[in-house]
Image: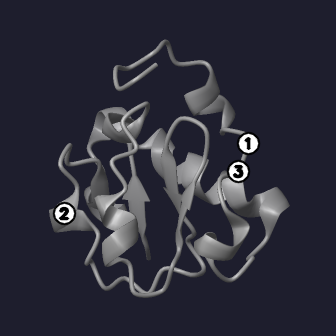
Amino acid sequence: MTYVIAEPCVDVLDKACIEECPVDCIYEVNRMLYIHPDECVDCGACEPVCPVEAIFYEDDVPAQWKQYYTANVEFFEDLGSPGGASKVGKIDKDHPIVAVLPPQGGDH
């Protein structure tokens, strides 16, 4: 089980969750943040600090955003488990589910 970041994060990328994560498993990508399912320790520190309420426990993702669980898992299939978002830096790609969305707000 893991935490999942869903659509409210797209084009917002507040990053308060990154500051709270004790294991550095939240990766910044072009349009949103992704939680690495194998690196997440399920501590839940990220969830209450998200200003747009985009973070959910895997079983609690609202029905309209269930595909974001798949997006979080599939995003890391090619990347593997780098063992820390801070050393990787911003990743210049998005999952196809996110890439096709129209601009959601933020500074885009």
Q: Residue at x 60, y 72 (%)?
A: 86
Which amino acid is tagged 3?
Answer: Ile
Picture quarter with the N terminus: bottom left
Q: Residue at x 28, y 47 (%)?
A: 54
- The residue where tag 1 is placed is 92
- Give 20 or 78, whichever is nearer the viewer: 20
Relative to 98, is 5 on the left or the right? left
Disc 3 from disc 2: Cα separation: 23 Å
CB within 8 Å, label 3 to label 2: no
Helix, strand or loop at mark 1: loop
Q: Residue at x 25, y 58 (%)?
A: 60
Q: In this rendering, is residue 81 above or below 49?
A: below
Which amino acid is tagged 2?
Answer: Val
- Give 25 or 57, whichever is nearer the viewer: 25
- The residue where tag 3 is placed is 91
Q: In this rendering, is residue 72 above or below 103?
A: below
For label 3, the crowd category at 10 Å Cα-Cα, with few meaning under 14, some 14 to 19 and many 20 or more, is: some
- Give 69 or 95, whichever is nearer the viewer: 95
Residue 52 is marked as none
CB within 8 Å, label 3 to label 1: yes
The answer to which of marks 3 and 2 sits earlier in the sequence is: 2
For label 2, the crowd category at 10 Å Cα-Cα, with few meaning under 14, some 14 to 19 and many 20 or more, is: some
What is the quadrant of residue 100 in the picture? top right
Which amino acid is tagged 1?
Answer: Asp
The answer to which of marks 2 and 1 sits earlier in the sequence is: 2
On the image, the x and y values in percent for residue 43 come to 31, 85
Relative to 5, is 49 on the left or the right? left
Disc 2 from disc 1: Cα separation: 25 Å
On the image, the x and y values in percent for residue 23 come to 48, 86
- The residue where tag 2 is placed is 49
